[in-house]
Amino acid sequence: MSIPKDLRYSGEHEWVKVEGEKARIGITHFAQSELGDIVFVELPEVGAEIKADEPFGSVESVKTVSELYAPINGTVVEVNEDLDDSPEFVNESPYEKAWMIVVEPSDASEIEKLMTAEQYEEMTQED
Amino acid sequence: MANQPIDLLMQPKWRVIDQSSLGPLFDAKQSFAMDDTLCMSVGKGVSPATARSWVHHDTIVLGIQDTRLPFLQDGISLLESEGYRVIVRNSGGLAVVLDDGVLNISLIFEDEKKGIDIDKGYEAMVELMRRMLRPYNAKIEAYEIEGSYCPGSYDLSINGKKFAGISQRRVRGGVAVQIYLCADKSGSERADLIRRFYQAALKDKQNDKKGVYPEIRPETMASLSELLQKDISVQDLMFALLTELKALSTHLYSAGLSIDEEMEFEKNLVRMAERNAKVFG
């Protein structure tokens, strides 16, 4: 599986893409493949504050529900409403069509502390 | 996680929390907040694997997907008019009936470091149920029962009739595998209630429904007492649970929440209350 080099990653399998002053967030290919067919995505509303390492939503697959943990602190400025009707995007296109939220980070330097693609790849290959 | 379901069940220590006789004031939101709390403790390694038993009176627990029903409020009104409390849980699946004839069991395990062996958790629960029900000499099968409420691959059935369903939730390094076991009363009456709930909540949108809501055929569900033609109570199943866990462990002990867990529980309960307030207004 290829892990995009231009993104940063959290230990809870979220990716973060820096877009100017904002950060786009979703879950990784690894996470979606472990969860199986996603049937529902629960996301916060625009304006919600997210806190690093705290849940901001959940994904439900045919097998389980998993919390989504915020990789950084910030304010939600955009939510991917397409996932309401098409949760399968998370399986089909985790890095593109299935972005989940866009946030204005409280402290952009937090993103630098997340894992690089190489570090994330190493983590998912452990054990 | 272990390689075989039985390895998961054979824990050096099993912590037990019995909440099966707390009565009608025990709110189901507390149960889901409890399991999140225990997931965190087990995930962090401060608690061993934990089995929690729980019973709620006259409660309908909706799944997250049910919150998108087009006429949800009408469905809820129907349930409330029949004397049921309605809550939304945070684990997978769709609406289920909990009453004093239904024993719920949560098994809480530590998750694997990098990922997730989802089927193992389910299989461990199925194995435990087979052991608990072995004295009744019935063939227990695990496959989806079409026409049942909250259908899934790990529906438990005898002769094609479902008496139990399993869901799962993963929180901070812990996995909660939750089962509801219909001990007594009528399984088909429970199913009929959920059938009428979906009818009220979908109305004529049955065909263009957003989620996948089941078309319930009440005759596909039954309680263990009905299926085995014996009086099997929640207490009987509790006894079987403790007997099996004792056989599977060198140390079985009962322990309520620690002070840290109590604090975490309060936070999780607030989250459950907020989730429910969002849905019910």
Image (cartoon, rainbow, N blue to C red):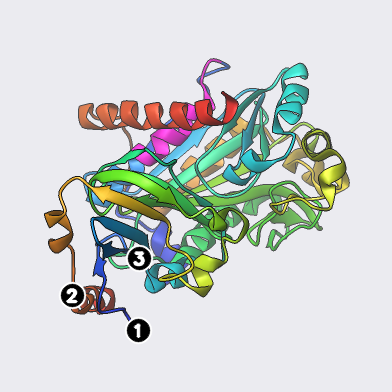
Question: Nearest the camera: B89 or B123?
Answer: B89
Judged from this view, the residue extending furthest toward the bottom is: A1
User: Of B18 and A111, which appears nearest the observer?
Assistant: A111
How crowded pointer 3 is (Cα within 10 Å; few <14, some 14-19, many 20+) is rated as some
Whether residue A101 is visible, yes or no, is yes
The reply, left or right, for residue A15 in relation to residue B129 is: left
- Residue interval drawn in magenta: B25-37
Nearer the camera: disc 1 or disc 3: 1
Q: Is residue B239 left or right of residue B224?
A: left
Q: Chain of mark 2?
A: A
Residue A2's label in the rendered image is: 1
Q: Are marks 3 and 2 on the same chain?
A: no
Magenta stretch: residue B36 in it? yes
Q: Secondary structure at mark 2?
A: helix
Task: Identify residue for label 3.
Answer: B1
The location of residue A19, given as percent across then percent down, is: 28, 63
Crowd around label 1: few <14 · some 14–19 · many ≥20 (10 Å) = few
Instruction: Using the image as rendered, state which of residue B64 and residue B82 is in the foreground.
Output: B64
Q: Amino acid at mark 3?
A: Met
Please, what secondary structure does the residue beneath circle 3 have? loop
Q: Which residue is mark 2?
A: A119
Query: Can you see residue B216?
Result: no
The answer to whether dots 1 and 3 both sit on one chain is no
**Which amino acid type is marked by label 2?**
Gln
Residue B260 at what x, y percent from top left? Answer: 21, 31
Q: Quadrant of residue B10?
A: bottom left
Marks 2 and 1 share the same chain: yes
Using a 10 Å C-alpha cutoff, classify the residue at mark 2 as few (fewer than 14 neighbours), some (14 to 19) or many (20 or more).
some
Q: Residue at x 23, y 73 (%)?
A: A120
Disc 1 is placed on an element classified as loop
